[in-house]
Amino acid sequence: MHTDSSADWYTVLPIGFEPTGLERLRQALTPLQAVVTVGADDWSEAVELASIGHYDALAVAYPLGGAPMSTFLAALRKPECPCRNSSVVLVAHERYRAEAEMYLGRGANRVVTWEEVELRLPEVLDRLFSTAPRLPLVIPSRIQEVAERPAKGVNCRTVNISTTGMLLDLSHSFRPGTVLAFELMLPGSHEPIRGRARVVRRTAEPSEPFSGVGVVFAAFDESNEGRLASYLGRFAS
C-alpha cells in the first residue's frame, strides 16, 4: 500500500518483534522509502491486520509464537487476503536459519538473520519490491553439487524462474542448504547461464506434480546475471 501515489513509498508490517528488535528493524529500513507500521504482537493479530489492509511486505520474527508458521502463512496466502501477494521476510537468529528456510516457497520469500539484518534486510526488501514474479519457463538445466569431493553432474529442467531463484524438476533430491553449481540454456542463446545457487526447499508432493528442489541464486559467472534479467524482462513483456 503506497502512502503517496506520487512517490515510491512502501509499507512494512512488523510481526512478533520485541521493542529492541523493532527499533533495529526501523533503523535497518531507513535507507529505503518504506514506512514501518505499528506492529502486530502475535500471529492472530497479524492475520487480522493483513485481512483488512494491504502491506507491501511483512517482516516476521522467527520463530513466531502462538501458532505454527505454516498456519500463519496459509492464512496469509488465502485468495481473499489482501496480503496474499505481499513479500514475507522471516528474521531469525543464525541457529534458526535452516529451520526458517524450510518455509521459503511455502509462503515466505526470504530469510534474513539478526546477525546481518542491518546489511541484508534493506537489500532484500529492495529487490523484492522491484523483482518481477517468477515466470513459468521450462528449459534444460544441469546442476552439480559443490563439495570437497567432485560430484557428478545431474541433468534436469527448470520449471519456473525469476531473477532471484528457480524451481528444478529432477529425480535426485538435495538437502536444504546444499550449494549447487548450475547451467541453464535460455532459448535462442548459444552460451549457458552459469552460477551457483543454494537449495532452500524440496517440492511438496502431491501439491506439486513432480519431485525437485527450489533454489535461490547465490552468485553468477561474469555478466550472466544481467543476461538472465534481460531475457526474463523480454519474456514477461
Image: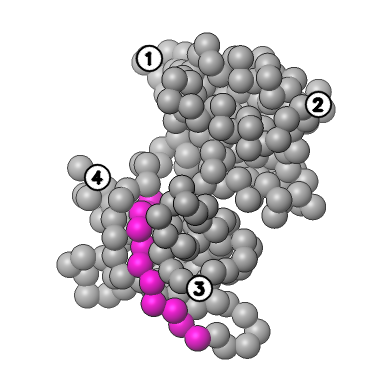
Mark 1 and mark 4: Cα distance apart in space? 25 Å
Seen in the image, is 192 located left or right of residue 54?
A: left
The extreme left residue here reads 188
SS for callout 4: helix
Whether residue 164 appears in this view of the structure is no
Per the rendered image, the range of residues in magenta is 152-162
Residue at (68, 19) in percent of width and height: 44
Residue at (56, 40) in percent of width and height: 108
The amino acid marked with disc number 3 is His
Inspect the magenta stretch and tell me whether residue 153 lies in it: yes
Residue tagged by mark 2? 18
Where, by quadrant of the figure, is residue 237 drawn?
top left
| Disc nearer the start of the sequence (3/4) | 3
Give x and y (percent) for residue 14.
66, 25
Residue tagged by mark 1? 5
Give x and y (percent) for residue 122.
58, 38
Residue tagged by mark 3? 172
Mark 3 and mark 4: Cα distance apart in space? 30 Å
Q: Residues within 10 Å of mark 3 (few under 14, many from 20)?
A: few
SS for callout 2: loop
Residue at (24, 45) in percent of width and height: 236
Q: Residues within 10 Å of mark 4 (few under 14, many from 20)?
A: few
| Disc nearer the start of the sequence (1/4) | 1
Give x and y (percent) for residue 163.
40, 52
| Disc nearer the start of the sequence (3/2) | 2
Residue tagged by mark 4? 236
| Disc nearer the start of the sequence (1/3) | 1
User: Do the residues under discs 2 and 4 have CB atoms within 8 angstroms?
Assistant: no
The amino acid marked with disc number 2 is Glu
